[in-house]
Image (cartoon, helix red, strand yellow):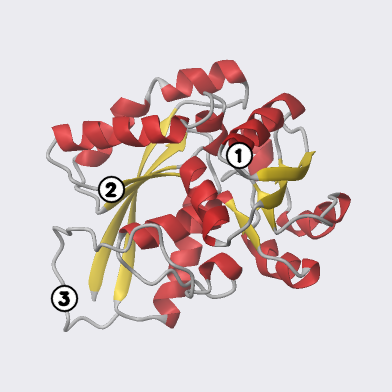
Amino acid sequence: MTDHHIGLIVPSSNLTMETELPRMLGARERELPGDRFVFHSSRMRMRHVTPEELRGMNAQTERAALELADARPDVVASACLVAIMAQGPGHHCTAEAEIGAALRGQGAQAPVVTSAGALLDGVAALGARRIAVLTPYLKGLTRLVVDYIEDAGVEVVDALSLEVPDNLAVARLDPEDLREHWRRLDLRRADALVLSACVQMPSLAAIQPVEDAAGLPVLSAATATAYRVLGELGLETRVPGAGRLLRGDLPGRAQTPAVSTRTTDQDITP
């Protein structure tokens, strides 16, 4: 059994990423025995999804990265998509570089993933050029997300904002409602549907049902982050029941196994 240690940088009010990512990788453990995933989190203060609080949260990123460096993770994921995208096109590259530098300064060599960059990578892996997007954000923030995606060369054919500014309220949204919300989007020209462009809005339970009903690939910020995390670990990007992106037959962005400082305990039964 090989342990893979995953560091998460999350908003202080996050309730969902630390639920959905372990749930996905736990399902993978049961289907593909041999790999076990261990999670370590560092939190940055943020309660309301507003431009001011997002900027304040981003200012805490280095401190959060330094805390995670002490745990010597095998990969680090920064999980707040809108906090990155609200800073302007391409900012995920800057954020990943800054977190990586902070980790290396403490002797931690973990690759870095952001949910913002992961979503773009997931869309690219699916070969999608046109997408529809559903967010919990106020319309102004959704516009920033749309602009960010389109700057990366992907057309957003339609977007729906649920307009919930309180981050705890976002976490309490019922994922079952997404089975109806997506029908409000115009998917006639879409190659894929982003069911939740937010790692705080629960969507995992709806991903596969909506994909089956819509007849096109469905992904979320969370499933895209799982895809990137597995790729950075050099593992097969397969999670059962989590949509086309995680079926295991798409090329990962990074397939070079991460250098792990953990032991492999072959004789321990999971």
Callout 2 crowding tier (Cα within 10 Å): few <14, some 14–19, many ≥20? many
Q: Label 1, label 2: how many angstroms apart (C-alpha)?
A: 23 Å
The numbered dot on residue 111 is 2
Q: Earlier in the sequence, mark 1 or mark 3?
A: 1
Callout 1 crowding tier (Cα within 10 Å): few <14, some 14–19, many ≥20? many
Residue 3 image offset from top left, x and y in percent: 25, 66
Q: Nearer the viewer, residue 166 or 136?
A: 136
Per the image, the residue denoted by label 1 is 149
Residue 62 image offset from top left, x and y in percent: 30, 27
Whether label 1 touches label 3, CB < 8 Å: no
Callout 3 crowding tier (Cα within 10 Å): few <14, some 14–19, many ≥20? few
Q: Nearer the viewer, residue 40 or 146?
A: 146
Residue 195 image offset from top left, x and y in percent: 69, 53
In the rendered structure, which amino acid carries the disc numbered 3? Answer: Asp
Quarter-of-image position of residue 147: top right
Per the image, the residue denoted by label 3 is 265
Q: Nearer the viewer, mark 2 or mark 3?
A: 2
Is residue 262 at least partly visible in the picture?
A: yes
Q: Label 2, label 3: how many angstroms apart (C-alpha)?
A: 23 Å
Query: Under tag 3, what secondary structure?
Result: loop
238 to 48, vertically: above or below:
below
Query: Under tag 2, what secondary structure?
Result: loop
Q: Earlier in the sequence, mark 1 or mark 2?
A: 2
18 to 147, vertically: above or below:
below
Please report the residue visible at 76 percent of the width from the left and 70 percent of the height from the top: 215
In the rendered structure, which amino acid carries the disc numbered 2? Answer: Pro
Q: Tell me: 205 left or right of 64.
A: right
In the rendered structure, which amino acid carries the disc numbered 1? Answer: Ile
Q: Label 1, label 3: how many angstroms apart (C-alpha)?
A: 42 Å
The numbered dot on residue 86 is none
Quarter-of-image position of residue 264: bottom left
Quadrant of image for the N terminus? bottom left
